[in-house]
Image (tube, rainbow, N blue to C red):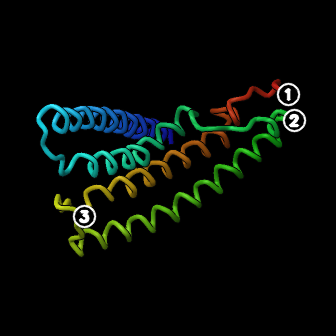
Amino acid sequence: MDFYVRAVTALSRACGVAAALMILAAVLIVCQMIFVRTVMMESAIWQSEFVTFILVGATFMGSPYVLLTRGHVNVDLLPLYLPHGARVKLALLASTLALVFCAVLLWDSVVWWLEAYEGDWLTSSIWRARLWIYYASMPIGFAVLSLQYVADIYCVATGREMPFGMSPETRL
């Protein structure tokens, strides 16, 4: 299981790097779009749509890394009042519910992606981009996020990590 945790950690970090590169690409493309529109006085056909898709994709692709680094919004008030044993149970319950939620979204996003791929869905703009390429970030992101939740549940259940990142002595 140690190999699993290391592999999922590496996957989550790779997703974080991919998300950062996607955001960088979006910034560069917006700059290019501004240059094309204001300096060259030409129309921008694909840039706005591409930036929208890539930023949404970065959100899905970056979610496993955010979970790995505990970068998400977290309300610690209830765990601070609980003893360590109850804190472990709460963390396991919350992570299990989140895993079930992610698994449902993974299933639905795979179905949606497959429909777009098999139906050769295109954007309605003049650019006519293939939507399955952009929709792929959803099942990839939810798959790795689900794997990260399994790793987190294992680490908390075995005592490798403290629930909510709090030591047993931390209490209000």
150 with respect to 9 (left or right): right
Q: Nearer the viewer, mark 3 or mark 1?
A: 3
Label 2 vs label 3: CA separation? 51 Å
Could you tell which of marks 2 and 1 lies nearer the N-terminus? 2
Could you tell which of marks 2 and 3 lies nearer the N-terminus? 2
Q: Report if the CB atoms under discs 2 and 1 are less than 8 Å apart.
A: yes
Report the label total: 3
Which quadrant holds the C terminus?
top right
Question: Residue 158's spot in the image, x, y percent?
Answer: 66, 39
Question: Residue 147's spot in the image, x, y percent?
Answer: 48, 49
Question: Residue 143's spot in the image, x, y percent?
Answer: 43, 54
Question: For the residue marked with disc 1, what is the amino acid?
Answer: Arg
Q: Residue at x 38, y 66 (%)?
A: 110
Question: For the residue marked with disc 3, what is the amino acid?
Answer: Thr
Label 2 neighbour load within 10 Å: few <14, some 14-19, many 20+: few
Q: Nearer the viewer, residue 145 or 116?
A: 116
The residue beneath circle 1 is 171
Report which quarter residue 156 is drawn in.
Answer: top right
The residue beneath circle 3 is 123
